[in-house]
Amino acid sequence: MTDSLEAIGITVRYGGNVAVDGIDVAVPAGRMVGMVGANGAGKSTLINAIAGWSRGTPVVRGEVRLAGQKMDGLPPHRRAERGLVLVPEGKGIFAELTVMENLALVRPPADTRGRHAFSMDDIFTLFPRLAERRGHKGRMLSGGERQMVAVSRALRAAPAVLLLDEPSAGLAPRLVHELLTTMRGLVDRGLSLLLVEQNARATLELVDELYLLERGKVVAREAASDMKDDPRILEAYLGNLTA
């Protein structure tokens, strides 16, 4: 199986502090890869580095390849133009624009070969609630609805690989399940997805492969089905599921 995304030796330094230390990540074509870890483990720093975006001015080293094409060195908007599309943590949408206006800000590329294009009708089929709220301004939406808009904007950009950072943050468990199940359905249709999540329980249920990060390093990488009984996951994130 070929890899849609390869990140090799990613290191991120802020001054003398190493936030991410030589991490390798591979997202195979048509697979959903999860990345979990405690707060401060380096998850968001890593996915942002892959997308070419960062808070502050870190020193970033390593290689990023999308379908074999070199991405490192490109600014984030150029990576997005080539199909490496990030939904950052925070559900950032324009509060004074309507749902339709937020979505219309993204123009799908003319050439969508090797990518996954979504029309407005596709978006409203995936997220019927947005169809109902299409005329409402961003400030009037719930947290779950704002997250739907943020994800939908990324899908309108016709991603080859979608990077999704902490989509469950601040959402009720039911909405988390609905959103991640929708993402799983898109992966089953061929989309490649890298998911960074604090919610390891929800992640394990849906991803194909799981990375566990601690202090900027990958300490475990296995098929998700094999990680469910990993004592580090059970103790740190899930609690005693056998009780």
Image (cartoon, rainbow, N blue to C red):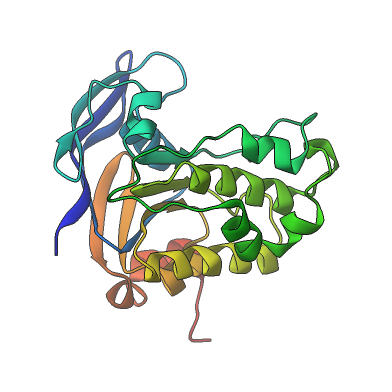
Quadrant housing residue 17: top left
Query: Where residue 26 sits: x, y (%)?
Result: 21, 51
Give the farthest residue toward the bottom.
Answer: 243
Judged left or right of residue 84, residue 88 is: right
| Residue at (82, 36) in percent of width and height | 139
Relative to the observer, which residue lies in front, 215 or 45? 45
| Residue at (32, 69) in percent of width and height | 208
Number of numbered labels in the structure image:
0
Whether residue 194 is visible here, answered yes or no, is yes
In the rendered image of this protein, does residue 60 appear above or below residue 124?
Answer: above
Query: Where residue 158 sits: x, y (%)?
Result: 43, 46
| Residue at (45, 68) in percent of width and height | 184
Query: Where residue 1 sits: x, y (%)?
Result: 14, 65
Whether residue 36 is visible here, answered yes or no, is no
Judged left or right of residue 70, residue 122 is: right
Query: Where residue 125 sits: x, y (%)?
Result: 63, 65
Judged left or right of residue 182, residue 36 is: left
